[in-house]
Amino acid sequence: MCISVFMWQAHPKYPFILLHNRDEFYSRPTHPLAWWGGETILGGRDALGGGTWLGSTRTGRIAFLTNFREVETLPHPKTRGDLPLRFLQSNESPQEFAEHVVREAHQYNGFNLVLADICTSTMVYVFNRPNQDNHPSVALVTPGIHVLTNASLDAPWPKAERLRQSFKEFIDEYGESDFPIKEMVEKLLTNTVKDEECMLPGIHPPKREYPLSSIFVETELSPGGPYGTRSSSALLVKSNKEVSFYEKYLDQKQWKEKMVAYKISDI
């Protein structure tokens, strides 16, 4: 179901730090981290839907997504992975793009979408399940540490709070030093601690929610089959606009990794 933790505009050396686990059925075809779209977009790609869960561009645009856990889903929804992709392809500001998304948000199952422009120091959060009326909302993301699970931004699910705390401790440990990106992923995104039944969200039966209550997921869902964390990513942006994008991904039952570095262009 995916989980992200990120720090925005709150570190002297890194204006943006993101860690992200993507959970998906193992059978869903996926392309690992790479440049695509004419070498303009960097990210993994859902080979079935054509979109992405996390991507960036050379011009400083970043977008990532998690699904919202809900009981009822649409019979023929649009693919949510198309939303980050469209933002990365566009020239609109995060706010402008978010306003367009709001007008069509009813065509998608529940989602959390974060849109950022590093060059303008702007980050926007779009949520299409904020209240009983299902009216979508758009909000500027404030500086600090935020966690995104399968509820609204910063919802205090136990797994979210575990990740928030470990992330903060890691940041404090390294201070203003360079962060070891691979170690961050290994140390923070592989936690398999699960919740007690009384702490589960209670949206689905405990039998389904319990195996999904850890930061790193490995289970079997019915229907669907083997399911779990398919990739763990870290995206770090320095104040000099150097970007490091690292992905550890599962490929035919083997874990592989890829690192891409580039510098954001002001053009």
Image (cartoon, helix red, strand yellow):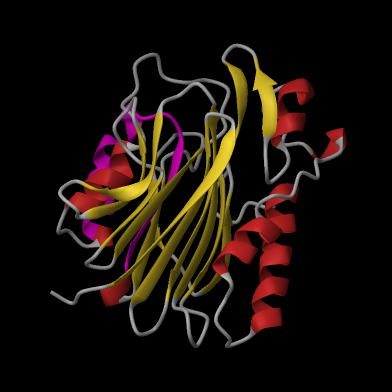
With respect to residue 136, does 79 lie above or below? above
Q: Which residues are magenta?
A: 96-117
Q: Quadrant of the N terminus?
A: top right
Residue sitting at x 77%, y 36%: 200
Q: Residue 18, percent across and down?
A: 50, 62
Q: Residue 106 lies in magenta, yes or no?
A: yes
Residue at the spot 64% in from the left edge and 13% down from the top edge: 222
Among the 4 quarters of the image, the one containing residue 135 = top left
Residue 243 in percent (x, y) is at: 37, 70
Q: Is residue 54 above or below residue 234?
A: above
Query: In the displayed structure, does residue 25 sit left or right of residue 65?
Result: right
Q: Is residue 165 above or below residue 15?
A: above
In this view, the residue in front, 242 or 166, is 242
Q: Quadrant of the C terminus?
A: bottom left
Is residue 109 something that shows in the picture?
Answer: yes
Answer yes or no: is residue 157 visible. no
Q: Is residue 170 left or right of residue 258?
A: right
Front residue of 226/260: it is 260
Residue 219 placement, left or right of 58: right
On the image, the x and y values in percent for residue 110 come to 46, 34
Q: Which residue does the image show at 19% across and 55% down from the upper left?
A: 40
- Magenta highlight on residue 19: no
* Numbered marks: total: 0
Residue at 35%, 85% in the rendered image: 240
**Where residue 212 sits: x, y (%)?**
69, 34
